Amino acid sequence: MSSTNARFGSMSAFHFLDAGQRFLGVTDTGSWFAGKILRDAEGRPTMIDDYLLAPILDEHGLPLDGKRDSDAEGMNISGQKVTVSFERNHRIAEYELDLEKFASRPKILPLPIPKEELRTNRGIETIAYSPPDGPLRGARVAVTEMSLNKAGNAFAAVLEGPRKGIFYVQRRDGFDISDGDFLPGGDLLLLERKYSFITGISVRLRLIPGDMIKPDATVDGRIIFNADLSYQIDNMEGLDVWQAADGSTRVSMISDDNFSVVQRNLYLEFRLAE
């Protein structure tokens, strides 16, 4: 994806508002982005239409200013409520869904993980809503990129409900968590990435059984997708799981180009093999 607008890029998270068409997302430079994916007769994505950018506002109705306050990393939507996580100035904020004026001001939520455990640029990357009929009963889950406990595993937390509390995601093979979303049955799908100066970037998807997620647990799961630079990938940072009109489960990813000449804004879409 490309644009002549100099502010186009640094996309951290996004989610569809319907079955693979309208979407909303956040950048790590403090903007909302929204638009619509156009598709061909077979349903394959062809282009982006109605794309727009708007500043994320602070409690005073002013645009977020400076990297410390504007570094939005995780985002998810439930009904009219949009939940966004920020790192550096670590916080989780709720906004009302407003696709016309983008004038919503945040309600700051209590941090579910002690602030001293959150690393400056390795904070909460994932905000995911569990399905209402799954093991977590619709609760939100937050997962950090690489804020590690003494055992070397990533801090995570269930924000509400009967399983509210901190848990941990086992860190494996040097991969860091960049986003996540729940499958319809209640399992958590995590997007992970690893960078090596020699081999470049790799990405993978790890499937965490939902019934494993509970306070004080350390969770792990099987790898269902793995790709390196021999495939068309980039710095994949955003993940969305959604249901297509034909009933299939789709998995979409976007990359963060970091406004770098050697990285791209890439959109990938897959049909999950049930």
Image (tube, helix red, strand yellow):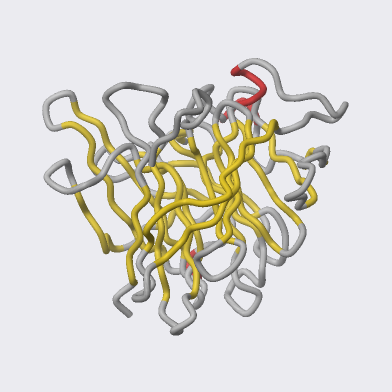
**Residue 225, picture quadrant:** bottom left
Residue 10, compared with residue 21, is above or below; it is above
Task: Looking at the picture, tell me which residue is in the foreground, 34 or 46.
Answer: 46
Q: Position of residue 263 (x, y in %)?
A: 30, 30
Say which residue appears at 43% left-offset and 68% top-offset: 209
Q: Quadrant of the C terminus?
A: bottom left
Left or right: residue 227 compared with residue 74 = left
Query: Which residue is painted at 60% across and 55% down in the image?
Result: 141
Residue 243, position in %: x, y? 49, 74
Quarter occupied by the N terminus: top left
Q: Is residue 68 left or right of residue 238?
A: right
Residue 167: image location, x then y, percent? 54, 51
Residue at the extreme top? 66
> Left or right: 29 with respect to 80?
left
Q: Is residue 221 above or below residue 75?
A: below
Name the residue: 49% across, 68% down.
242
Figure check: 113 above or below 58: below
